[in-house]
Image (tube, grey):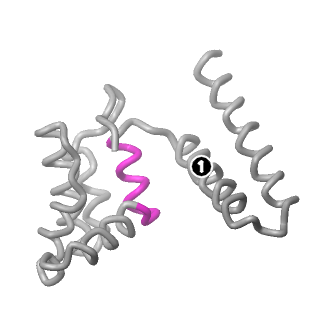
Amino acid sequence: MSQPNSAGLSLETLLPAIQRLSEPQRIFLVRYVGRGAATGSYDALDAVALAYPRIAHSSKRVKALAYQLLHRTKIKKLLALHFGQSNLDLTLADVRRLVKRALRRNETNEKLAAALNRISKTLAAIAGEQFNG
């Protein structure tokens, strides 16, 4: 993850929304954001090991859970707020991911991949107009 920009929200500002997560997810996010903001190094593996001590001994499971947590919708949205990203940024990233996956899997539904690619380009153009206009 990148550093939060000047528009990003602090951990204290995010706390009310963080309270809606499960206990282990709260521990993960508070550790991830808190330590990352303090040190400049965002370490999802460290945060998982603290939040889920029963799997801390298995680096493979820790890595898998870190990936899963960072891709959960609620956590992604909170991290986007922390890093100063907009919902449009999140949507663009999701569309790009879907297009890449469809192309990588060589899915037969080429029309879907082409449509997602057009949507991604259109959203990027809209985002550019919003920030430049």
Q: How many marks?
A: 1
Task: Tell which of 73 and 97 is nearer to you.
Answer: 97
Q: Is residue 82 left or right of residue 85?
A: left
Name the residue: 50% across, 39% down: 86
Residue 14 % position (x, y): 27, 49
Q: Please tell me whether mark 1 sits on a helix, a strand or a loop.
A: helix
Q: Quick check: 42 above or below 20?
A: above
Q: Residue furthest bottom?
A: 54
Relative horizontal placement of residue 66, taking residue 68 as reference (left or right):
left
Question: Of all residues shown, which one is farthest toward the top?
Answer: 133
Q: Position of residue 119 (x, y in %)?
A: 76, 45
Considering the image in quadrants, where does the N terminus appear? top left
Q: Is residue 123 left or right of residue 64?
A: right
Q: Quadrant of residue 5?
A: top left
Q: Which residue is mark 1?
A: 91
Q: Which residues are magenta?
A: 71-82
Kindly identify the residue that appears in the image at 34 percent across and 72 percent down: 64
Q: Residues within 10 Å of mark 1 (few under 14, many from 20)?
A: some
Left/right of residue 61 with respect to residue 37 in the rendered view: right
Residue 74 is a magenta residue: yes
Q: Give above or below for 56 relative to 124.
A: below
Along the line of sight, the residue nearer the viewer: 102 or 95: 102
Q: Position of residue 44 (x, y in %)?
A: 24, 58
Q: Residue at 58% x, 22% y: name it.
A: 131
